[in-house]
Amino acid sequence: MRAVFLDYQTFSPSLDLSVLRQTVSKLDLYPVTTPAQVLLRSIDAEIVLSNKVILNRAILSQLPHLKLICITATGINNVDIDAARELGIAVTNVSGYAKNSVAQYVFAQLLAYYSQIEDHNNNTRTGQWQASDTFCMHGKGSDELAGKTMGIIGYGALGSKVATIARAFDMRVLIAERPKAVTIRIDRVAFEQVISQADIISLHCPQTAETEGLFDKKIFNGMKDSAVLINTARGALINNHDLLAALNNNQLACAILDVLEQEPPPKDHILLAAQSTKLKITAHIAWASQQAQQALLNLVAANIKAFKQDERTNRID
């Protein structure tokens, strides 16, 4: 089966593609693909691999050879699933590959924030400790994770891994029930209770019609003013204007974002332009350890192999 990978540049160039190549007769790699190039590059393909390239109904209806779309990510909002189903095109995604990478990122950021690592490094780098009158220079101090309450929004593989590590730090972990849920599952806590009690809220839920803009003015008003919000899920979960207002009004201590609603963001993006010291923004890198990327591509290869054997592994439709 002939395959094209439309946005391979979303992965590191040093990955091993041998397992993936073994599942197809031909694999064409394109670093990036613009909307105008999708049709031409996919026209003869039986398999299309896409991380973020949009595959809508108009495109899919013009690809008569296409049998399988492999989304090289967990989120599926770049593919028109209904159109694919109607056209008899199978769709797969991957999940669970980045749980270690994302959890490590979450706690790397939290440890840097609460331990003020960069400030303490800088005190020695700039000679301030050397000039100190005492053996210990406290600088901005440090604060322990132990005893703090971690609220987890979205309890799949990623949220579960973060919760496990949080407990190892002797943190109290609250797993949020879905907003507006009528009943609370035995291992969950009401969403509003998590929001009001958490010292740290870590987002791991998917972007859906129900979760877009979920964290808005109302939610921020209900959070502790000392709370830290960390988002490694999807940028659209947060209302940017309301987040910035909450930070500026001291309703929230810090926001750590690895995702924005538009990626890459424009230079004048409201959160980037704000240059707030309470905002830490990274370029959607939490998922992307070398190990996680390799595991992802190996899972894609497994999906293709399963499809060829008429097995419904990781099928969306």
Image: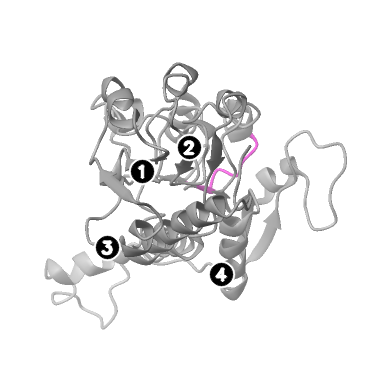
Disc 2 crowd, CA 10 A, few/some/many (<14, 14-19, 20+): some
174 lies left or right of 168: right
Residue designated by label 4: 165
Mark 4 crowdedness (10 Å alpha carbons): few <14, some 14-19, many ≥20: some
Q: Which residue is mark 3?
A: 118
Quadrant assignment for the C terminus:
top right
Callouts 3 and 1 close, C-beta under 8 Å: no
* Type of amino acid under label 2: Asn
Q: Amino acid at mark 4?
A: Ile
- Of the pair 10 and 215, the residue shown nearer to us: 10
Q: Nearer the viewer, residue 17 or 61?
A: 61
Q: Which residues are magenta?
A: 222-230
Mark 2, secondary structure of its residue: loop
Sooner in the amino-acid sequence: mark 2 or mark 1: 1
Residue 250 got which mark? 2
Magenta-span inclusion, residue 111: no
Q: Which residue is most to the right?
A: 183
Mark 3–mark 2 CB contact (< 8 Å) = no
Q: Nearer the viewer, mark 3 or mark 2?
A: 3
Residue under pointer 1: 2
Mark 3 vs 1, N-terminal side: 1
